[in-house]
Amino acid sequence: MQGERRDAKLLAVSDVREFFREALHLALGHQHLRVRDHTEHYVVNLLAMFARSEALFEAGPDGHARLKPLALMLADAVEAPDDRHRYRTLQRLGDVALFIAGFLAGGCAQRAVDVDYHIAMGGRAYGALAQAPHHGPRRALAEVFAELEDKFQPLVDVLHEIGDGAQPDSPRDLLRLYELWHKTGSRRAHRLLLEQGVQPVASGQRPH
C-alpha cells in the first residue's frame, strides 16, 4: 500500500491472524463486499498461513524453493490416487491462486494475463470443491468454497487493497491498473483509474 502507507509508521504485529482479520474486514467494507463469517475466517487463515514463505513455496528438484505452477497442481489433482488427495490438491490450488492473484498482485499483476489465469484456475478449483460431497460439519466448508468461487474476482480486489492498496504513482502503475481492469473486470481498478482522471473504455466502445 505504497501511497496509503507512505507516511505510516511501522507497526509491530504480535498476532498475524488478528492483523489480517482487521485488514480484511476493513477492505471488505471499502469494497462493499459481503461474505459469510465462515468465508471471512477461511480467508484470514489463508493469509496468515501464507505469511510464512515455507507454506507457499515448495522445494524443487534442485532443492531450491519454488512456487509450483497451477497447471502442475491441477495435473496432480487429476492423477490423485483418491478423493481425499484430490480435494486437498484442489484446495491448495484455489488457495495459492487467490493469494497470488490478490495479495501478491504487485508481482504477477505486472502481467495481467497471469491474474486472469489465476482467477480462472482458482475459481474452478473452488467450484469443484463446492460440488464435492461433504458430510456433517464439513457442509459449511462446501458453502465457503461455493462463495469463494462465486466471489473470487471481488475477493481479489479486496486482497489487492490489503497487499497493494496504493494510489497509482506513475504511468506504469496506471497502465498496470488498466490492464488489470481490461483482463479481469476489477471494480477496484476501474475506480482507481477514474480517480486519476482515466476513463476505461472496453474494446469496441467509444469514450463518452
Image: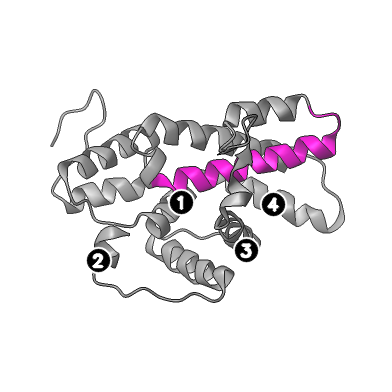
Q: Residue 54 location, x and y as percent?
A: 61, 50
Q: Are marks 2 and 3 in contact (CB under 8 Å)?
A: no
Mark 1 — residue? 103
Viewer-nearest of discs 1 and 2 = 2
* Earlier sequence position, callout 1 versus callout 2: 2
Would residue 110 be visible to someone looking at this image?
Answer: yes
Mark 3 — residue? 41
Q: How much space separates mark 4 and mark 2, taking CA atoms?
A: 39 Å
* Earlier sequence position, callout 1 versus callout 4: 1
Range drawn in magenta: 80-105
Up the image or down, 38 lies above or below 100; here it is below
Q: Which mark is residue 70?
A: none
Up the image or down, 136 lies above or below 203; here it is below
Q: Residue at x 49, y 71 (%)?
A: 22
Mark 2 — residue? 6
Which amino acid is tagged 1?
Phe
